[in-house]
Image (spheres, rainbow, N blue to C red):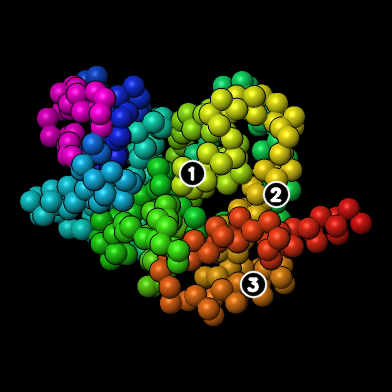
Amino acid sequence: METFIVIPCLNEEDCIAATCASLGFGDGLEPFGRLVLVDNGSSDGTLGALSAIQRTSPPGRVLITQEHRRGYVPARRAGMATVLAVAQREQLHEDLVLILQADADTIYLPGYVQTMGNAHRGGRGQLLEASAVTSRDFNLEFPAFARLCREVDSEMEHWFAPEANQVVVDDKVCAFLLADYLAWGEHQDETDDCGKPVLAETTRLFLRAKSGGTVWRDRVDSAEALPSRRRLRTQAPGHFACSGFPRQRQWIEAWGAPGEAQPFLRSPKRWPALSRLVHSRQRHQMALFALLPAVYEKHPKIHQGLATLADTVRTSYAATSPGFLLGLMLRLADDEQGPLAALLRNGRRQSSG
């Protein structure tokens, strides 16, 4: 199996070297696999940093390409096109090329690449997802925020579909065969029914794959990564409100200005709109980790209200694009008086009674 790691880069001069070193590239390291770095029109010194990583890695192990159209989808597609070109030039069978998606500001713990490679069973239809964990230092710096997240999330866990049924994919810690990527239709730009762009490009790729045939998602807990918390440090209320799921910048900023992030992280229970934030996070989790999986496969012990809503969504929107369906999930999550909000209110009343 030939392994390629694809990383989109936009103004990542300060962190890309550390990320690549954690994957075994640069500084004279002997890497496992090959690295594809995609400069997405950076205006800082990112391109020079990429060249330095290439110079200090073994010849031919780091490939650099440029995609000037901004956005995750164009950058990821450019990286995948580079992998495909290499595979065709070297006559590598697409079933024997494993692609790891990575992020430019994430640190991958030792053995990550090899562990992900070993976890692939061979054959088509498998999407791997590693474990993205919060660093101990961040939790020690903001213990009240970490405690709030644990409290809210643990309260919601009984709603969630089993792990085997989950369909939301973390873009920066996943892997799949080149053959599967092509068969699943590649990363696509999509909009919701209002014409607004929808993010979460790899979740949409996986949803398209589930609609088209046999595919499954395997967790690889022994492969771990430490994502950057820089977005939390500047936009904490908004990222908390959507449970970290990718939302447009305007949505995130509507929950709080950058200067308010640190006070929220340090003392979240003093936040004046905390109740709305918590309920928004809960509705996002209900939509993405309970309702959305049920649309694709009814899971055991599902709440009857969720099952009914999933049947309605499945009947009405089965033929729509993943982008449209995700857009619907996010609208349900945003609706403070909608069906998900009602289910949560009823659940809280029953537990308190």
> The residue tagged with tag 3: helix, strand or loop?
helix
Q: Residue 250 carries which label?
A: 1
Is residue 43 one of those drawn in magenta?
A: yes
Q: Which of the two discs, 2 and 3, labels the residue nearer the N terminus?
A: 2
Q: How far apart are marks 1 and 3 (CA)?
A: 28 Å
Give the residues drawn in magenta, as a range.
42-66
Return the residue nearer the eye: 88 or 117. 88
Mark 2–mark 3 distance (CA, rounded to whole Å): 19 Å
Q: Residue furthest bottom?
A: 315
Q: Mark 2 points at which residue?
A: 279
What label sits on residue 181 in the rendered view?
Answer: none
- Which amino acid type corresponds to the residue marked 1 in the rendered image? Gln
**Picture quadrant of residue 290:** bottom right
Amino acid on which disc 3 is placed: Leu
- Of circles 2 and 3, the one toward us is 2
Place of residue 236 in the rendered image (x, y in percent of width and height, measured from the top left): 57, 33
Magenta span has 122? no
Q: Is residue 334 above or below residue 50?
A: below
Q: Circle 1 sits in a helix, a strand or a loop, which is it?
A: helix
Q: What is the residue that sits farthest to the right in this orientation? A: 353
> Label 1: few (<14), some or many (≥20) within 10 Å?
few
Label 2 packing within 10 angstroms: few (<14), some (14-19), many (20+)? many
- For marks 1 and 3, the one nearer the N-term is 1
241, 337: nearer the viewer? 337
* Residue extending furthest toward the left: 89
Q: Going 39% across and 66% down the picture, which residue do you hit? A: 208
